[in-house]
Image (cartoon, grey):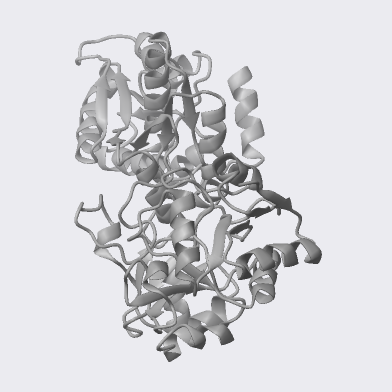
């Protein structure tokens, strides 16, 4: 089969629509990922989609419509709450699962008595549906198990010669597939596949709780009957082995660097993936996985995203876990501590507090004997600078002398907080990687409070980053 490559002009979209009407397959852009489309009401077209992708036939397809008015032609029921969501979010990255009419063949729904319906936001996608005159069944336009395509070049890589046409549109802005929401019980909406539309957004529209199906919260059982795409089978996998690392950002990045160095010494081609937040990860993840395959990486070490189940981070982590085959390592933060005799008792109290928080402590001394602080301030600074610890805490009588010693080490930013505000600013403005505490200035309770503020405050970055960079160069 020779694949025809088309533009998003109306003339070319008409050509793709004619292919759809005649029972063929055409890939097209949406705001989430590229889809591989066929006539949703034609069992042969549905079978052709499964064959082209190498997709298991019990994995249901999403049916795309050009507007909400077309839902009643294929859904046996379109309850009020589902209508409210369609009115608030469509066109957009939300798929509604509803009872199906007999007109929708089992081949499209994977044998289920429900149908997954969505109205895409991309103009070319809706134009294709309108010109075809039929609802279009369209999973992601990739070989089953591979990262979903966010550019037409990704579709070409996987499906050239497997479909009649590819519409070459712009890169997808969303980057991950739509949220699939079970609305068969309209008063208890349930997410079957997380996406850019969060449960919080659904609750905002409907005023009722929205939950996750328990089947997507962990590794799926072999006997699972998937109610939505992506629930059962391995998805989004790069050719390379992929490992995830979860935990505090500094600890994870230290662990990834150490693991990468060790693997490179073994001759492995190692790639590292870091994202600042879920939105960035959603837009880049699939493209990055494909790029790293092209560059010949044989192992990918990636920082897992954190965040609540209400965030886009959770949706992207769903994809990352599947891409990594659920191989994830929890990483604990490591903090190096040292003191002179004046800060010995305070160091012990802070260490105990850190251990209660689940943080690994590296005690570099001293043990209470009379010593001078320069040696121990330098020891903490070097442990952090060398990557042996994520952060450091140094204690002496006032915190001043040992901070001077720590700051002699290149790349160390040691702050001395004496108020809660100073502890927050040490991280927010200065991104201090070592904290100095005075055993004769602070009570253990005050010191532990300041340590918590320092650890839990986010670095604000922006123009502060320029000053931090200047400090690191001095």
Residue 173 versus residue 339 in the image, above or below? below
Snapshot quadrant of residue 295 = top right
Residue drawn at x 67%, y 76% is 130
Q: Quadrant of residue 167?
A: bottom right
Q: Quadrant of the C terminus?
A: top right
Count of numbered circles in the view: 0
Q: Residue at point 70% right, 65% down? A: 124
Q: Is residue 449 left or right of residue 349?
A: right
| Front residue of 49 and 269 | 49
Q: Does residue 438 lie above or below 325 as drawn?
A: above
Residue closer to the observer: 48 or 448: 48
Q: Quadrant of residue 180?
A: bottom left
The percent position of residue 166, horizontal first and vertical second, equals 66, 53
On the image, the x and y values in percent for residue 41 come to 49, 75
Residue 49, horizontal then vertical, whole percent: 48, 58
In this view, 255 is above or below 359:
above
Above/below status of 212 relative to 230:
below
| Residue 220 point in image, percent of width and height | 25, 53
* Residue toward you, 53 or 91: 53
Report the side of 10 relative to 59 (left or right): right
Q: Is residue 441 visible?
A: yes
Residue at the image point whose x is 63% and y is 72% from the top: 129
**Residue 429 visible in this rendered orientation of the protein:** no
């Amino acid at each position: 089969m020779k694949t025809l490559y088309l533009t998003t002009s109306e003339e070319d979209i008409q050509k793709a629509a004619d292919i759809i009407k005649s029972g063929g397959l055409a890939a097209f852009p949406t705001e989430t990922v590229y889809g591989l489309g066929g006539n949703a009401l034609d069992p042969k077209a549905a079978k052709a989609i499964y064959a082209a992708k190498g997709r298991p036939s019990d994995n249901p397809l999403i049916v795309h419509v050009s507007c909400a008015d077309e839902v009643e032609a294929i859904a046996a029921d379109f309850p009020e709450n589902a209508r409210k969501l369609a009115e608030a979010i469509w066109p957009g990255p939300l798929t509604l699962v509803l009872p199906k009419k007999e007109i929708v063949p089992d081949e499209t729904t994977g044998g289920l008595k429900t149908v997954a319906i969505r109205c895409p936001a991309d103009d070319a996608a809706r134009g294709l549906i309108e010109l075809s005159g039929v609802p279009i069944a369209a999973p992601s336009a990739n070989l089953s198990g591979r990262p979903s395509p966010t550019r037409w070049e990704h579709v070409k890589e996987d499906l050239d010669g497997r479909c009649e046409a590819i519409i070459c549109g712009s890169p997808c802005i969303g980057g991950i597939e739509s949220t699939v929401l079970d609305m068969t019980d309209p008063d208890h909406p349930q997410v079957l596949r997380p996406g850019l539309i969060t449960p919080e957004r659904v609750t905002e529209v409907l005023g009722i709780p929205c939950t996750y199906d328990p089947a997507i919260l962990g590794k799926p059982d072999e006997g699972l009957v998937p109610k939505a795409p992506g629930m059962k089978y391995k998805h989004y996998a790069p050719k390379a082995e992929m490992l995830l690392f979860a935990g505090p950002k500094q600890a994870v990045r230290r662990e990834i660097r150490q693991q990468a160095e060790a693997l490179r010494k073994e001759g492995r081609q190692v790639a590292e993936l870091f994202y600042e937040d879920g939105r960035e990860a959603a837009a880049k993840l699939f493209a990055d996985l494909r790029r790293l395959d092209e560059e010949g990486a044989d192992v990918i070490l990636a920082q897992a995203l954190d965040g609540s189940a209400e965030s886009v981070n959770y949706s992207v982590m769903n994809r990352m876990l599947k891409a990594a085959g659920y191989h994830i390592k929890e990483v604990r933060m490591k903090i190096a501590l040292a003191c002179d005799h004046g800060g010995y008792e305070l160091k012990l109290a802070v260490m105990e507090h850190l251990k209660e928080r689940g943080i690994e402590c590296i005690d570099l001394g001293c043990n209470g004997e009379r010593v001078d602080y320069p040696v121990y301030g330098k020891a903490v600074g070097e442990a952090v600078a060398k990557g042996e610890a994520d952060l450091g805490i140094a204690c002496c009588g006032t915190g001043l002398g040992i901070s001077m010693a720590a700051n002699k080490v290149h790349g160390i930013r040691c702050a001395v907080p004496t108020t809660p505000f100073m502890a927050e600013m040490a991280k927010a403005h200065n991104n201090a990687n070592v904290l100095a505490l005075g055993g004769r200035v602070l009570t253990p309770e005050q010191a532990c409070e300041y340590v918590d503020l320092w650890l839990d405050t986010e670095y604000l970055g922006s123009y502060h980053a320029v000053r931090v960079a200047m400090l690191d160069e001095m």
